[in-house]
Image: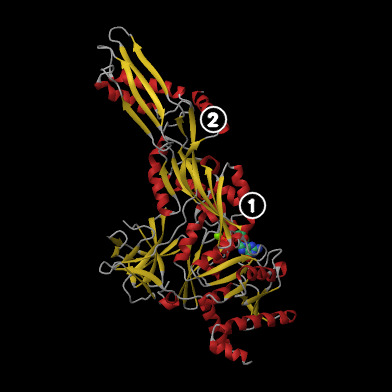
Amino acid sequence: MKQYGIDSIRNLCLLSHAGAGKTSLAEAILFTAKATSRLGKVDDGGTTSDYDPDEVKRQISLNLTMLPAEWQETKINLIDTPGYADFVGEVRAALRVSEGAVITICAASGVEVGTEQVWAYCQEASLPRLIFINKMDRENADFYRTVGEIQARFGPRCVPLYLPIGAQSDFQGIVDLLAMKAYTGSPAKEAEIPAAMQDKVNSFREKLVEAAAEVDDALIEKYLGGEELSLEELSRGLRQGTVSGRVIPILAGSALQNVGVISLLDAIRSYLPSPQEREVVIVSDSTEQKVTPSETAPLAALVFKTSADPYVGKLTYLRVYNGAIDSNSQVWNANRNEAERIGQLLLVRGKTQEPVSQLKAGDIGAVAKLGVTGTGDTLSGRDKPQKIAPVVFPEPIFSQAVHPKTKADVDKLGTALSRLVEEDLTLRVRKEPDTGETILSGIGETQLEVAAERMLRKFGVKVELDTPSVPYKETITASAKAEYKHKKQTGGHGQYGHVCLAVEPLERGSGHEFVDKIVGGAIPKNYIPAVEKGVNEAIHEGVLAGYPVVDIKMIAYDGSFHPVDSSDICFKIAGAGALKRGLAEAQPIILEPIMNIKVTVPDEFTGDIIGDLNTKRAHVLGMNPQDGANVIEAMVPQAEIMRYAIDLKSLTQGRASYKVSFSHYEEAPPNVTQKIIAEKQAQKQAEKA
Ligand SMILES: Nc1nc2c(ncn2[C@@H]2O[C@H](COP(=O)(O)OP(=O)(O)O)[C@@H](O)[C@H]2O)c(=O)[nH]1
Ligand SMILES: [Mg+2]
């Protein structure tokens, strides 16, 4: 592929609700632009975009994919994105490096939850966009109903630029409302505008002309004066309107039948901005500056994705904002303050890679096997270190415990997990100290399942995912005294250790404390550390269900010893034994972790969400309206919300979001306590069997 100047590049992402046809549309675009020679199908696992084995298997996109195409002297860096909410990290990364977006909407399903979500992301980023109403060939496809929904949700600035000719099994082609031309078939051939459509065409053209004229004072004057605007003037007005976000043109077609795709390519080229038309914030010498991307400025390139490629190893995706980056050069990583060696630069299209000697401002490419650089870093020249704000990824909200299957899997788990986390910055790994489990957190269940499959396929590590154990704790509610004598006479040398221990409850959150109040050498000083070790080990397992004991003071106040038979180990055993007895006497209870939860939910679901929280033993603290939604704040036992990401999605069709943080430990109610004890006993039985 030849090199393109900054004003001949369009970086844009395809966004939509899952299944609206982004990947199919990308395939049709590549085919139409002659970047590929055959039109692959999602259903056969044969698209350029969904090449990853996990994508082929599930027939959905899981990763962002670079799909560059050339169209009339313009390089279109198309980025296909996943529609499933679990993979929003990839969408965020794609948005970060795009100057525009094409929002695909299914003509039969209309505006869906995912459409609203990606719309909100575009709004947040002030991203110019086009709408492509896809699947015009499908049963129930209705362009006008869909336009109505779009305008009702997103406003009248969304205006049709094309109208479909026919629909469903009778879908034939499209009418260009600006040039007043009709095209039918695939490949498209110019045709007559059907006579029956003439009124509709005229009235929609009127709205389009008005929208295009409105953005420019000279044009609106001419228009209001009753003068006819030229095609060139209308086109200019429409471009200005689209780039500034005041107009959002709507197109129509069918990705599957490759209809309307030429017009989409034309619209991308004509109406979406070039990299030069979108300023970027660069931090250099600790000052922040908004600059217009330029080929002549010093190098600034943002790393927006890292992937573990089975063939080339680590692959790092770069978006060059300023200057140029050369193959086989040295650059500076300003985030890590380290030099980085750049090997062969690559243009990536799906799974194929084409070597290039240079990537210039505005363009997107990749490089293999970088040493220190990770997603979010900026590469620049050593003499002019610069940083570009990285992609902001959402915080993980759904966790699963990772159980390796075999010993070999245990050994390789750490490396595999760290590679996964490097690839997907919405994933986190941590070890839960209380339960000893390795916890993988992310956005949703499918994402974690895919991560587990990837671990097996890419790194040969087999794991099972399971709901994490709740880190319960135990404590006491009364003071008690207990003693334990460890005494054994075995042949010659015997064993002897004797400890009297008092236990007292401490305030919640105080941990544990050991006090030595032995007087008169009842237990000699040199054995006290052994007593302490014994009780401190024993508190790891409470007497109710084996959970760690907290908020307890343990006082050794008496005991006895034997001049010959006593030893450290005997006093350790005696200390532990005294503690177990003391705990049993001191009215032990189970403590459960309580979380703060903040659920942001559209008005109409507020009642359902509160009702559901109540069934989860939550204590609702308050509710505040915020940007047309309600923010519900509550405290809820952790045990009740281990799968909240899934519950909330099904309650609201994915229209709500939430955040949790640890609050405190609280006594579990009796029925919950009984259940926990019963479960623990069953588990012990199962382990014995
Ligand atoms: N009838 C019809 N089906 C389509 C069209 N575009 C996509 N599909 C089908 O819709 C499903 C989802 O398409 P896909 O491209 O994976 O959607 P994505 O999730 O947005 O990438 C697949 O079964 C496609 O074959 C279209 O224009 N017409
Ligand atoms: Mg897809």
- Reply above or below: 508 against 82: above
Q: Is residue 128 above or below residue 528?
A: below
Q: Quadrant of residue 174?
A: bottom right
Q: In this orientation, which residue lies closer to the viewer: 649 or 602?
A: 602
The answer to whether residue 253 of the structure is visible from this angle is no
Across and down, in percent, residue 662 comes to 46, 45
Helix or strand or loop: what does disc 2 sit on?
helix
The residue at the point 64 percent across, 81 percent down is: 207
Image position, residue 90 (x, y; %): 48, 59
| Kind of residue at badge 1 | Gly
Q: How far apart, in angstroms, are the residues tagged by discs 2 and 1?
A: 33 Å
Q: Position of residue 656 (x, y in %)?
A: 57, 55
Asked if the residues shown at circle 2 and circle 1 are in contact, with their CB atoms under 8 angstroms apart, the answer is no
Describe the element under mark 1 as helix, strand or loop: helix
Q: Which residue is mark 2?
A: 679
Q: In the rendered image, which residue does mark 1 sit on?
A: 607
Name the disc covering residue 339, or none.
none
Q: For the residue carrying disc 1, how many other residues have a C-alpha within 10 Å: few (<14), some (14-19), or many (20+)?
A: few
